[in-house]
Amino acid sequence: MQMDEEEKKNSIGEGLAIQVKDVVKVYKLYDKMRDRVKDAFGLGKGTHKLHYALNGINMDIRRGETVGIIGTNGSGKSTILKIITGVLHPTSGEVIVDGRISALLELGAGFNPEYSGVENVYLNGTMMGFSEKEIDAKLPAILEFADIGDYVYQPVKTYSSGMFVRLAFAVAINIEPEILIVDEALSVGDVFFQAKCYHKFEEFKEMGKTIVFVSHDLNSIAKYCDRVFLLNKGTLLGVGGPKEMIDAYKQVLVGQYKASGSKGTTEEELDEAFANLEGRNPKALEYGDGRAMIEAYYVTDENGTRTNALIKGTRFTMHMRVSFRADLPAPIFAFSIKNVQGTEITGTNTMLEKAFLEGVRAGQTKEITFTQNMDLQGGEYLISLGVTGYEGDSFQVYHRLYDVLNVTVVSDKNSVGFYDMNSKVTVKDAQQTN
């Protein structure tokens, strides 16, 4: 039987804003669409596998504290936030919340793309239970914080991602929340807007509000969080102070985490989790004439461990294995990186690097590696691969895989723009001149 709101408040632990009790979230993964249809219409049991996005998660978040949630892709960070906010329901377990929640989840959540910015402000405010008169009073503060000018009167589908997050955050912080939840969205805004948002975090902390946020910017996690929860593959590995959990996270990234202090996770389970951290996209765009085929691809860190999570400032290697079905005069092997908004950030190939300018024979297989420093800002990135070449004056595409791998960059210092110049800075007293 469902508890009403008063019963829920009474059942939450003393001093807690959020209590997560043994939460499990399971998804059915189908190999074939007809199996999904069978299950949906009760026409028999479709063949499926069970995927545990969350497996027995317990969290106690106290009123007035700022809590960070960190972990690799697929660890369950966004899923637990969606369950806390009511966007998703758990398969089992329960979440009890005491206080008005304002959430800034993935871009697009809660906004109608056809409505203008102002219309979406009123839509969101109404959904939160405010009257039109109350929203009228809050509108100037929202528009001032968003600072997107006359674009507030245009449909939000015309906004850049940065403009969108400005408005969404402005709405989230001005509806008088007692609990603010943010899921990585601030990484989209420019560095000055991010500073403005984190200043707001400080104000909220002083006002005794509860903040829960997910970020790959470890510097922000260390600076603003009182406690940090570390997730991996749907399991809670630990909870503690920022430094302790960030150190544990870095061990997870390089496959060195020891599970002795965590509940319910064996070293064998962790090994299995690391083996699957390749971030492959089954729906990657693929084309080419087939005379060369990219058969295998993966990323390794500076220790040679396969991973899809890299620590900023470290060395990493992109690996490709390519087989040839025809004689080719001089194939070119390439890889490129774009952000999740689709902007091509960097890339290279063997012709640019003058690393391979030879012909190949049918039946041969080549192993190609690109090794370099990871100097991109913390966040999510997509890798594309290709094998092309010139035959006379004609450019040929033998095999291309777009957005085939997802890589997370974990950073404890994000600078301005896409990459870090790694400046060496000195400050000293100027010499006095007469």
Image: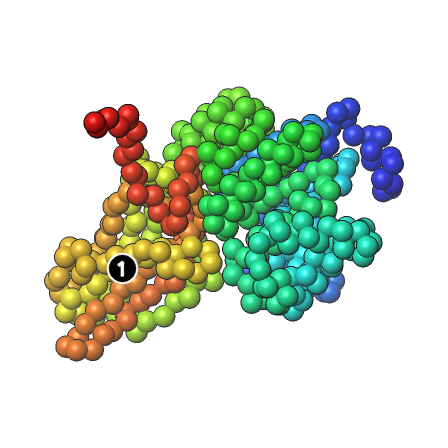
Q: Quarter holding the C terminus? A: top left
Which residue of the protein is positioned furthest toward the front in this rendering? 434
Task: Answer with the quarter of the image where residue 136 lies.
Answer: bottom right
Which residue of the protein is positioned furthest toward the bottom in this rendering? 393
Q: Is residue 352 above or below residue 249?
A: below
Residue 103 place in picture, x, y as percent = 66, 46
- Comparing 278 with 338, the one in front is 338
In the image: residue 181, left or right of residue 196 = right
In the image: residue 217, left or right of residue 34 = left
**Residue occupying image coordinates x 65% and y 69%:** 114
Decide if residue 382 is in sight here.
Answer: yes
Task: Answer with the quarter of the image where residue 264 lies.
Answer: top right
- Comparing 146 with 85, the one in front is 146
**Residue occupying image coordinates x 48% and y 25%:** 243
**Residue occupying image coordinates x 73% and y 37%:** 178
In the image: residue 160, left or right of residue 60 = left
Residue 50 place in picture, x, y as percent = 60, 48
In the image: residue 281, left or right of residue 288 = right
Q: Is residue 116 above or below residue 417?
A: below
How busy is the neighbourhood of tag 1: few (under 14 within 10 Å), some, or many (20 plus)? many
**Residue occupying image coordinates x 81% and y 57%:** 132
Q: Type of residue at label 1?
A: Ala
Residue 425 place in picture, x, y as percent = 29, 33
Q: Quarter holding the N terminus? A: top right
Q: Is residue 207 above or below residue 358?
A: above
Q: Which element is circle 1 on?
A: strand
The image shows a total of numbered marks equal to: 1
Decide if residue 362 is in sight here.
Answer: no
> Where is mark 1, residue-wise?
334
